[in-house]
Image (tube, grey):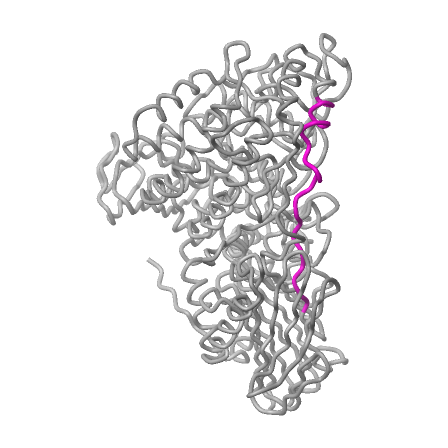
Amino acid sequence: MRTHLYLVLPLNAFFAHAQWDASRYLVFNTAASGLSSSLPIGNGRVAAAVYGTATERITLNENSVWSGPWQDRGNANSQGALSSIRQKLINGDLSSAGQQTLDTMAGNPTSPRQYQPTVDMAIDFGHNGTLGNYTRVLDTLQGTAITSYTLGGVDYTREYVASYPAGVLAFRMTASQSRKLNVKVSLNRTKAVASNTASSSDGVHAITLKSNGGIEFAAEARVVSDGGSISVDGQAISVQGATAVDIFFDAETAYRYPGSIAREAALKEKLDNAVKVGYPAVKSAAVKDAQGILSRVHLNLGSSGSAGRQPVPKRLSNFKKNATADSELVTLYFNYGRHLLLASSRDTGNRSLPANLQGMWNDNYDPPWQSKYTININTEMNYWHALTTNLDETHKPLFDLIDIARTRGNAMAKKMYGCNQGFVLHHNTDLWGDAAPVDKGTPYTVWPMGGAWLSQHAMEHYRFTQDKDFLRTRAWPVLKEAAEFYYCYLFMYNGSYVTGPSLSPENTFVVPSNMRTAGKTEGVDIAPSIDNQLLWELFNNIIDAAAVLGINGTEVSKAKDYLSKIKAPQVGSKGQILEWRNEYQEAEAPHRHFSHLFGLFPGSQMTPIKSEKLAAASKVSLDNRIRAGSGSTGWSRVWAMNLYARLLDGASVWSNGITFLQTYPLDNLWNSGENRWFQIDGNFGFTAAIAEMLLQSHEVVHILPALPKTALPSGSVEGLVARGGFVVDVEWRGGEMARAMVTARSGGELRIVVEGGIAFMVDGEVYDGPIQTTVGKRYTITKAS
């Protein structure tokens, strides 16, 4: 068992003795050139992207600063057109059905609100010369960042902390010689600034910026000086001749505080408290909090030696030439994903929000894909590793948003589909829980399955935590209301309950010769495979949850009835899983989505343990799509990694992971998508895939299910979590398990498989079946002698 010390060293001692752990620190020897090379920190509500430039720039975000208030975009023509569209789909008039779908069901306007920047902070040091001994570092274990350099014989250090306990960001600037530190601090925003003032009164030195944009907010920086003089300089605070300067920052918005008095009171209270206790105390509590959570898991994939002691851009460049030389880059990326999720998704009490497409870090008023919540893969991917890598508290903001969306989705179900019970979500939402279809195209607009996919996270949270109170009060209402919508919405077609109009997210097919209009590319159809797989998952989750909660009656019998009439995944003429109701010709063979493989991952219907036949067909589909050129964005490539892990194909997990690291990370290791735009989902999906490679837990706790034995002959991991509430530590040598420890958090039955089925012992006895575990007890697993 490792012991964790929360040490706060003097910064000059820290840098003098720093041996940067290649699996823990992102190290740079130059300042950031833009957001994609900045250092991201956050406390789950307020975030900073630190540039480390001579005149420091820090992009600051509060996660509820979006472009506007709630808007009802639902199309009033939808309900009246539904039966006509369905009849056209049944008759094979796909093109006409697709056009009518867009004409009568697309949202108006077509897009929900988009995520916005909050403010930029500038800190002018008057440092115009060459900065020597420059180092910029992000600590993925403590969630802190540091910049250090020498100028004119003086060592300057800047430290950046995001405090969850204090609810603020805190920055400290120091100089190695007394009275050598001069700073000028200002806040800036290019749009919707109601006021931007600096003030100095009663010992409080502050810059306050208020915005009257789509969501009003107030942002404030408090400046505290150790020595020197402090004064107002226009819209800035200037400090001259100090040894240290501390800055505390917060922003509060109308999303959580509709009235300005309450909003500004919350801002004042947090900043007053932070200034009162002082920077060392704020930092100490922040580090203890972050490290206490992030240290639950420790991954060791071997040492990179000198290759790992290079700056991040050099490591990435070298990795493209020789991936085998820097195994710790994989470990660092795994750890970075956990840091980013903790930084961007915490229970902040009043209407907490989940990580969006860019986590929380955004400097663009028109960000790619609006930096919203895309719920046909991306938002869900953000949370794939939350439970397996022991970060279950990061999951709560997702359920807060789902609860808001349930209310919006119920109104949308009535308006669009005539369904009075339950809720519907389409393929995107925003902080208001927007439930209407988004954009206007047949491959993506009308997909009424977002609620079903999100509901899976509610049941999975229970399976990993065994928290029955959560299951009863948070998960069951989500599952029940999601199912109630589908009981109303689904219709019978060829003996099965089906969806329609619907689609396979963002993909298209060629209309066959026996349908209209032959040869045209379309997206809308009846019963795409992913819809059936999501419904299978949902109705099974209803049945499982009801069994735990002791619920009987129509809620269970109805789920069983509908489950029995959901069409099973179909295997095509080439041995592949069919993506649509018919074996259509794919319009884009290398498409980036693997929607028809949902039942393999993150679902459970097509896993090898559930169905060898469907797993084999899934592999055909996956191999074909990858060979054709899929995995063309970072998130797509890491989805492939997770799919191969579920297929127990460790070599393919690893090879796709290498391709990902050689292709998609930006300079600061953020994942990129099209046009090298930052999308955080790939960071999180990569972390999930490494965990899935080492531990799986559908029906059994499977230890080392997909270990790439040649690439990783030795290593260890501590603290991964399996369904059933089991914490698993594993060590392997020579490509085989050496020892594992399983700790039962909740008791209950423990079923174990090792490496696909080798013989093993538990506490010295040959394993021959399930174990009834005791809460808190650790079980030692070794190979059979």
Q: Quadrant of the N terminus?
A: bottom left
Where is residue 487? Give x, y as percent: 47, 23
Q: Quadrant of the C terminus?
A: top left
Nearest to the observer: residue 549 or residue 147: 549
* Observer able to see residue 140: yes
Where 514 falls versus 267 (above or below)? Answer: above
* Observer able to see residue 599: no
Q: Going 36% across and 44% down the picture, which residue do you hit?
A: 470
Task: Please check the rendered image and state whether residue 119 is part of the magenta-colored stretch, yes or no.
Answer: yes
Nearest to the observer: residue 454 or residue 241: 454
Find residue 258 and report its image quarter: bottom right
Q: Going 35% across and 21% down the picture, which residue do you hit?
A: 557
Task: Please check the rendered image and state whether residue 74 is part of the magenta-colored stretch, yes or no.
Answer: no
Where is residue 680? Give x, y as percent: 61, 49
Nearest to the observer: residue 440 or residue 420: 420
Residue at the top extreme of this rendering: 514
Where is residue 464? Give x, y as percent: 37, 42
Count the labels in the image.
0
Asked if residue 558 lies left or right of residue 419, the reply is: left
Q: Going 51% across and 68% down the picture, which residue do you hit?
A: 266
Q: Which residues are magenta?
A: 98-120
Where is residue 382? Give x, y as percent: 54, 45
Find residue 103 and report its image quarter: top right
